[in-house]
Amino acid sequence: MSDCDYVIVGSGINALIAASVLGKKGAKTIVLERNAAIGGCLRTEEITAPGFVHDVMATTLVLFRTSPAYGAIGKDLEARGFAFADTNLPTGVLRPDGSSVIFAMDRARNLATFDALSPGDGAAFAREMDALGADAPFLFALLGGSLWSLATAKVVAQQAWRRGLRGLAAWFGEALAPARGYLETTYQSEAIRALWAPWVLHTGLGPESAYSAEMAKVIAFAIELAGCPIAVGGARNLLAAFERLIADQGGVIRTGAEVTRVIEGPGGRAAGVVLAGGERILAAKGVICSTTPEQLYQTLLKDWSTPAPAEVTTGLKRYRYGKGNMQMHYALSAPPRWKGDADLAKVALLHLSSGLDGVSRAANEAERGLLPAEPTICVGQPTALDPSRAPAGSAVLWLQMPEVPRIVKGDAAGEIAIPADGRWTEALREAYADRIERRLAAHIENFAAVKLARRACSPADLEAMNVNLVGGDPYGGFCGLDQFFIWRPFKSSVNHKTHIAGLYHIGASTHPGPGLGGGSGFLLASSLS
């Protein structure tokens, strides 16, 4: 007798969406999480001081709000206590000289802002967003659909008929352009280039990466439409809503349940899993693993009777991870008073950056194993959207540095001593956090007076929290063109199938890649019965 229809290994956003969508279709699921709490990169804790609520890793939910998954189960989650917190000023950039650009969920305001910086840049932005909106059905079918499918083939064929083969080739050529060239040829204002350049880092790319221009445009389109929302009360409330929904559907979630291997059933089919204590859980229809490729093929399948195909072995050998990530959190006794524009205090996600060249330089330094001398600092202001995150009158800040080496070879500024083995230590983490704090404090008038506590999380700390974050890479693997789209995770990959019947692979390491949209979980669950 089987224990369920599907057993799901891992409990990140993709796993929870897969369980919820399958449950909505009547399938019984069991979700197994090795840690003491579910969520993957969704983790809410009071890590600085009592009463100060921090989303330790991921926090911004724009991809979730705009996803097909939310369209399918959003109302179910809202009925179980989940809600978005918003601001109409989703993002902005603050440069070293104190100048800033703030982007709103208001087209007219944005056009006026851009034209004030450089006449004609507002019209350029409008043209770009209108063109992307016209292409949206085709573009999002490629970014978020099952690429190896008849439906996608039909979409591409329709575009070829409408545009002509040469026109379609031109469209793909434009879509593969790097952000640097796009920003330099589209906007005259360095400030507007500085606004968008840091956002490509949140897709696991850099300004010189192929297709980074398209991702910058997609992000601009999405946040003007849907903002940069967070969960009221923290991401933990989204997780609680998922727990209630899955339970109401007859599903089961177990924490502290480490899966050690997939059970090989008759005919070489995946039949269930074995836990660390020896317990066996059988699945009638399949096993779904939200893991990295190494965890799946080298750990969970290590005792399989037949070896993996050569293309899988080669894919594993060549699979690589991207830059690391670092998080910092502050508890403040009062909201920050930013120097300059008073509206900076209302911005959901603010980048401290010197601009396009600064982002390129810091990203390149991190890729070469150096601590960037002037890293891009992403500052989230959760209490500007959701005052419940801190005691009355106080505030929290959420910082992310997306240009950090996984293994440290040196310091681009020549100031910080690096351990001989390049590993992240507490001393290295705090020294680098001090560099970040000095830049942050320079922009906030009352920083010294309101700072209560700081907590930093290095790439090593993040990996310790979530085994999928190898070396602190939050994107499940390098997101460059050769390891994305139809080539993710391997050149031989076909959607979310593996070479084993009944065994499926989802998560950030699979198409459509990382992010809180839960695309892989939704695509797979939608295709199963």
Image (spheres, rainbow, N blue to C red):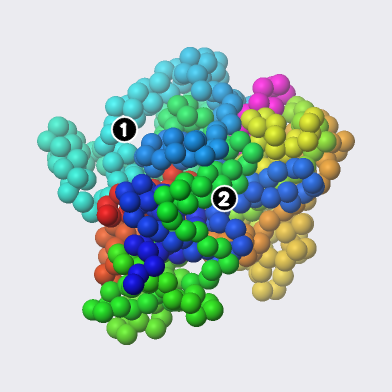
What is the span of residues highlighted in magenta in the rendered image?
340-352
Residue appearing at x 59%, y 43% in the figure: 237
Left or right of 166 on screen, residue 364: right
Q: Is residue 213 left or right of residue 257?
A: left
Q: Is residue 247 above or below residue 427?
A: above
Q: Residue at x 72, y 53 (%)?
A: 456
Q: How many marks?
A: 2
Tell which of 524 and 493 is nearer to you: 524
Kind of residue sitting beneath label 1: Ala
Give the residue drawn at x 70%, y 34%: 388
Secondary structure beneath dot 1 equals: helix
Left or right for 50, reference 381: right
Label 2 belongs to which residue?
42
Residue at point 44%, 44% (across, down): 517
Q: Earlier in the sequence, mark 1 or mark 2?
A: 2
Q: Quadrant of residue 508?
A: bottom left
Quarter of the picture holding the C terminus: bottom left
Tag 2: amino acid: Leu
Q: Residues within 10 Å of mark 1 (few under 14, many from 20)?
A: some
Q: Which residue is mark 1?
A: 136
User: How far from the left and from the top, in percent, is residue 100?
Assistant: 64, 27
Viewer-proximal residue, 376 or 290?
290
The crowding category of the residue bearing disc 2, from other C-alpha atoms within 10 Å (few below 14, some 14 to 19, many at least 20), is many
The answer to which of 522 and 477 lies nearer the viewer is 522
Cα distance between the residues tagged 1 and 2: 28 Å
Percent x, y for residue 428?
Answer: 74, 62
Q: Quadrant of residue 307?
A: bottom left
